[in-house]
Amino acid sequence: MTDHIDSTAQDHAAKGWDLHCHSAYSDGTETPEGLVLEAKRLGLAGVGITDHDTWAGWDEAVTAAERYGVPLVRGTEITADVDGTCVHMLGLLYDPTDPVLCDLFATTRENRVKRMKKMVENLSADYPISWDDVVGQVKEGEQTTIGRPHIADAMVAMGFFENRSEAFKHTINKNSKYYVPIVSPSAKTVVRAVKHAGGVAIIAHPAGATRNRSILTDEQIADVASAGLDGLEVFHRENSPEQQRRLLGLAKELNLLTTGGSDWHGSGKPNLMGENTTDPDVVAEIEARGAIAIIR
Ligand code: AMP
Ligand code: ZN
Ligand code: FE
Ligand code: FE
């Protein structure tokens, strides 16, 4: 398994699936079709569309996947909480008509808007920014899951920063005085909702340090696993090599699948599609466990 850590992202991309990518239905910069075309250009085995707290981009992605012959995994990156630590969960191949999961998304999306309005209010004390400026950056109207990157885009448009990363570094990161957390369900609640919808539940970037002061402990991950978790996204740029080794050990101990993804956001982040991927045998197991098929 250590091959995964020592091999370059390029080796891994050759035959892998990138199961973590965003479109403009959340905070990515490209359409679902653009996402599928990027996977085709790179020759990936397949790609996942995983916008934050929504499946609104799925239909467009399916149309593109069928047109261009790119295998597609439908999923969502779901905002969650573990003891006050913000955790992201990937829910893959679930039934999108499931009322429990759809209600959970709707609630989080409402909480996101409330939280974003508070952040804009906080920022307006020091910057001439209004809610309309942020809404002006949204590409898919009401269907878009709004987030801090849309504030960043508004500040870039007004000339305060060069790009999203600079805006995050200077004003809207977790430690800034303008930051407001999103009220979100517990990770165990999310796992149960994803399982209710027949999907596969994976903790995204479990050792990512950028959105929290501390990362999840072994005990916290084991507790989430007790609710029926399927896997850990080990191969992600926010998990250091040392953390990837720790997560591989933990996955073995807890009998969890190990996945990889780039967290591609188009031009909104430096992450390159295919820089981390998931092995085909793991994808086959995910499909066997899921409620809906991979589009091929
Ligand atoms: P939110 O969900 O509103 O808290 O915003 C978090 C989103 O912002 C995540 O999807 C990240 O990918 C994105 N993000 C975090 N840091 C940065 C950064 N430095 N540059 C661009 N996007 C970022
Ligand atoms: Zn994002
Ligand atoms: Fe994330
Ligand atoms: Fe993501």
Image (tube, helix red, strand yellow):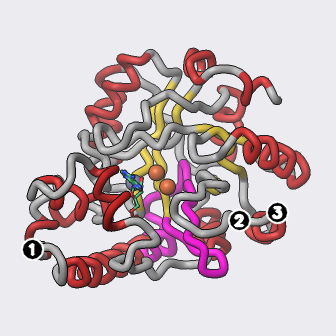
**Residue found 60% across the figure and 73% down from its top:** 85
Numbered badge on residue 128: 1
133 is higher (above) or lower (below) than 113: above
Instruction: Tell me, yes or no, if residue 49 can be seen here.
Output: yes
| Quadrant position of residue 207 | bottom right
Alpha-carbon neighbours of circle 2 within 10 Å: few (<14), some, or many (≥20)?
A: some
Between 205 and 95, the residue placed more toward the observer is 205
**Residue 132 pos. (x, y %):** 8, 72
**Residue 222 pos. (x, y %):** 82, 65
Ligand 3 within 8 Å of disc 2? The answer is: no
Mark 1 or 3, which is nearer the eye? 1
Tell me if residue 219 is in the magenta stretch. Answer: no
273 is higher (above) or lower (below) than 82: above
* Cα distance in 3D space between marks 1 and 2: 37 Å
**Residue found 57% across the figure and 67% down from its top:** 212
**Residue found 49% across the figure and 67% down from its top:** 79
Instruction: Tell me, yes or no, if residue 59 can be seen here.
Output: no
| Quadrant position of residue 55 | bottom left
Numbered badge on residue 218: 3
Which residue was labeled with disc 2?
216
Q: Hey, what amino acid is under mark 1?
A: Pro
Q: Does residue 248 appear left or right of residue 179 in this picture?
A: right
Image quadrant where one finds the N terminus: top right
| Quadrant position of residue 33 | top left
**Residue 271 pos. (x, y %):** 43, 37
Extent of the magenta region: 79-104
